[in-house]
Image: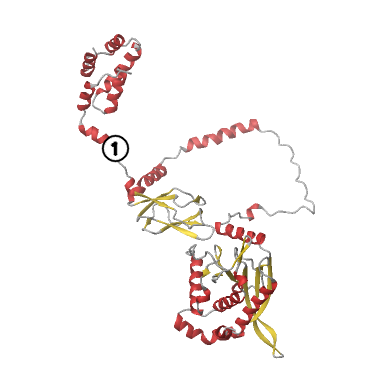
Amino acid sequence: MLSALRRKVTIGGSSASVLGKSLQAIRPGVSTSRVSANAGKEILLLQPRGIDHVRNFSHLILPGCSVGLTKTRDVISSIPSETILQKSRRAFSSEDGDLVDAVVPFMGESISDGTLATFLKKPGDLVAADEPIAQIETDKVTIDVVSPQAGVLQEYVAKEGDTVEPGTKIAIISKSAEGVAPAEKKSEKAATKPSPPAETVEEKPKAKAEASPAVEKPKPPSTPPPKRTATEPVLPPKERERRVPMTRLRKRVATRLKDSQNTFAMLTTFNEVDMTNLMKLRSDYKDAFVEKHGVKLGFMSGFVKAAVSALQHQPIVNAVIDGDDIIYRDYIDISIAVGTPKGLVVPVVRDADKMNFAEIEKTINGLAKKATEGTISIDEMAGGSFTISNGGVYGSLLSTPIINPPQSAILGMHSIVSRPMVVGGNVVPRPMMYIALTYDHRLIDGREAVFFLRRIKDVVEDPRRLLLDV
């Protein structure tokens, strides 16, 4: 009977009522009204329009029945093959092959995340392979996020100010211009969308204006504002203030300096240096130095060599406390504090004790340039056993520098000022510089600190000591 019923339905010769009575005879539990009400609708869907309609029909006629659907297969086979192929193509087609993700690169072992500082490109801009499209600001350096492929920047999936980790997707790059077409069409539709008629906009204020006379009430007399007392401070208006979030680099510097203040027992000792001989040495050989080495002879190389000599004479200044132990370092890596527009960074001149004046000058110039441009790497700032900070380039006369953790001391250089000095019983003008050594008094005693600073003074005032090692 089921085969006959299917045959009738397939050829369209049975009515909804016959279908309902037949099903009621087969399965009394099926409601005739429900079947007859829906059967007409489903039978109309037996045209070869897709597999889903056939599936709906088979479930309606035989709900819960496991009888084979041989005739149903016949109906499916009668559907044009082009229709089935078109539906299958639509289901499995993908445009993802044109899109590439731009992700946050590895930022260093000691850096787990960063802040998405700024976008260098806009959606719709053409980008080349390995071209920077955004900048990630970390606690130490600024890192570029580059485009993995040449193409068009389709969209950003992160916002400025978001905290991102290595591997986080921030943008989508389309290898061709097709990737941005949907966004452009959307914006065009939004631009061409007609605005609501002006009449409806004007009616609302008019209705309010008509109703206002009935609602109006006499205003109570306003009380005069209280007079300010003489002791009450007058605060400036908020319009004259700006609130800007701290950068990651600035927050990191603040944290490290506060930790240094809380950890070390800092003490500063001072001395002054007569710069006459070092300035004369520079003046006599600056042209020949540039001609041979391609870099200018500055004062930093002289002070680095003087610091190396002082650290070799007082190795405790190059040491550091680790728990209950003292770690003596058999290498000398000099950190040079460099001020940049984004904050203070401290690149390291490694193995400074093995370098000559020219090598030190080249290394310092290269690191300072990278720091200013924001291209310096984490490795170039890691480590360091002693720090030199030159506040004299900004005109500082005297200061007490703060130790750069986990080091134990820092040397502060200052501006050169001509002052009257007594030389050989006569008062003569001399170019003088104050120098300061801030040290961790838990590890370094005053005696070692004074001897260290005295050695720097002796070497800078008479550079020939470096040649004779005296």
Q: Quadrant of residue 122?
A: bottom left
Q: Which of 276 and 208 is in front in this view?
A: 276
Looking at the picture, how far across and down is residue 353, in whole percent? 53, 75
93 displayed left or right of 200: left
Looking at the picture, how far across and down is residue 459, in whole percent? 60, 81
Q: At numbered mark 1, what does the secondary structure look like: helix, strand or loop?
A: helix
Residue 170's place in the image compared with 220, above or below, is below
Looking at the picture, how far across and down is residue 237, in whole percent? 67, 53
Q: Quadrant of the N terminus?
A: top left
Looking at the picture, how far across and down is residue 15, in whole percent? 26, 13
Q: What residue type is labelled 1?
A: Arg
Q: Is residue 434 visible?
A: no
Q: In which quarter of the image is residue 260?
A: bottom right
Outermost residue, front direction? 325
Q: Which residue carries the number 1 mark?
A: 90
Residue visible at 41% across and 41% down? Answer: 193
227 displayed left or right of 275: right
Q: Which colour scheme is used?
A: secondary structure
Q: Can residue 37 be seen in this view?
A: yes
Q: Quadrant of the C terminus?
A: bottom right
Q: Which of 287 and 212 is in front in this view?
A: 287
105 displayed left or right of 93: right
